Image (cartoon, rainbow, N blue to C red):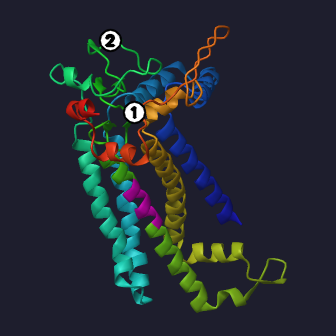
């Protein structure tokens, strides 16, 4: 099954790319980053020095500075998927009398996703300046563990408000900093988190909808051709009943671009679905990605302990106010006046 081997390689490549592009850029620490650094040290013995320098400059440009490359890649992937969907899947499904509203649903989701993408990439995430610093510093209390009072950002030369962080990509401090997203080329902070939340969920819904429609089309093809009740003869001349693997290979040879696209959007649905669940968990517990990552160094508990022998600190999330209030904070960031009322 040469096709299955190639497709497995393709899946592994995409998973590796997702890990490198989504995890590594946002994390300078952690086991994955340390593994990548260790691998680079090993490869440095066999790769020419000049090539190493060029590679390091390119990687630094891609992963440690603002770049529109990933935005272009994002648009190109969307264009490729929707081009294939429009050119083949939509036409075939229309001939098979699929409901028009179902076929138009991916385009409606695309329109919503593009709107959220533009808002997320263009909106102010919560840049801290000398003009708004005095008001932003009063919104959240310092928990004394992840965020401590009196810490000054050496770059911006301002005291860091609680839940803020200096973004090395954008070279600025961001209020309620979550992470820097290379796919929208912007930080995700207090004032554009709602747009990112909707952008992510519409993107996952797009992939899932296209996957469902495409899979339904291929299943319909199999049922109409009565292929499952047929048989085939192998290289040794023996007759076999049609199996799933043979069926997949046959569909790939008949509709190569459609099956290839289906594999991609299924994988994308799984990855985006998992990330959506993670972001929903963060929203419901009133955490940011930055806070969740930093809190892993301690332990999560409903109390704070400081033992005299090992000085062990147990982290408590003091910002959670209940599920509905936490979710409301994403779509309506608190102001100084609202905090004073509470």
Earlier in the chain: of badge 2 and badge 1, it is 1
Residue at position x 25%, y 56% from top? 115
Q: Which residue is mark 2?
A: 152
Is residue 218 found inside the magenta-colored segment of the image?
no
Q: Is residue 238 left or right of residue 205?
A: right
Residue at position x 33%, y 27% from top? 140
| Dominant secondary-structure state across the stretch colored magenta | helix
Q: Is residue 258 left or right of residue 108?
A: right
Quadrant where the N terminus sits is bottom right
Q: Is residue 26 visible?
A: no
**10 Å crowding of disc 2: few (<14), some (14-19), many (20+):** few
Q: Which mark is residue 62?
A: 1
Q: For the magenta stretch, what is the residue range?
A: 201-208
Query: 246 and 253: which one is in front?
Result: 246
The spot of residue 255 in percent (x, y) is 53, 75
Could you say whether the residue bearing mark 1 is in a helix, strand or loop? Answer: helix
Is residue 204 found inside the magenta-colored segment of the image?
yes
Could you say whether the residue bearing mark 2 is in a helix, strand or loop? Answer: strand
Residue 5 appears in which quarter of the rendering?
Answer: bottom right
């Amino acid at each position: 099954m040469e096709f299955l081997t190639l497709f497995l390689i393709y899946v592994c490549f995409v998973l590796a790319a997702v890990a490198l592009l989504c995890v590594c850029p946002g994390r300078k620490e952690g086991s994955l980053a340390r593994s990548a650094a260790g691998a680079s040290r090993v490869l440095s013995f066999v790769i020419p020095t000049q090539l190493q320098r060029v590679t390091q400059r390119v990687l630094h440009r891609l992963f440690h500075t603002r770049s529109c490359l990933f935005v272009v890649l994002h648009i190109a992937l969307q264009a490729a998927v929707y081009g294939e969907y429009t050119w083949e899947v939509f036409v075939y499904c229309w001939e098979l009398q699929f409901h028009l509203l179902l076929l138009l649903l991916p385009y409606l989701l695309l329109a919503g996703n593009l709107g959220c993408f533009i808002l997320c990439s263009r909106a102010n995430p919560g840049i801290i300046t000398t003009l708004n610093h005095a008001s932003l510093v009063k919104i959240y209390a310092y928990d004394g563990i992840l965020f401590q009072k009196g810490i000054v950002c050496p770059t911006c030369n301002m005291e860091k408000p609680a839940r803020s962080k200096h973004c090395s990509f954008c070279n600025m401090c961001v209020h309620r900093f979550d992470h820097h997203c290379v796919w929208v080329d912007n930080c995700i902070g207090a004032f554009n988190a709602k747009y990112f939340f909707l952008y992510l969920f519409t993107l996952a819904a797009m992939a899932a909808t296209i996957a469902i429609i495409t899979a339904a089309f291929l299943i319909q093809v199999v049922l109409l051709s009565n292929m499952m009740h047929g048989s085939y003869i192998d290289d040794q001349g023996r007759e076999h009943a049609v199996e799933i693997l043979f069926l997949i290979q046959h569909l790939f040879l008949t509709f190569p671009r459609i099956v290839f696209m289906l594999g991609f959007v299924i994988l994308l649905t799984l990855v985006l679905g998992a990330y959506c669940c993670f972001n929903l968990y963060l929203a419901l517990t009133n955490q940011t990605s930055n806070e969740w990552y930093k809190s892993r160094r301690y332990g999560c508990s409903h109390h704070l302990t400081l033992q005299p022998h090992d000085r062990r600190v147990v982290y408590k999330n003091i910002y959670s106010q209940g599920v509905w209030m936490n979710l409301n904070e994403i779509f309506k960031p608190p102001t100084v006046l609202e905090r004073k009322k509470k």
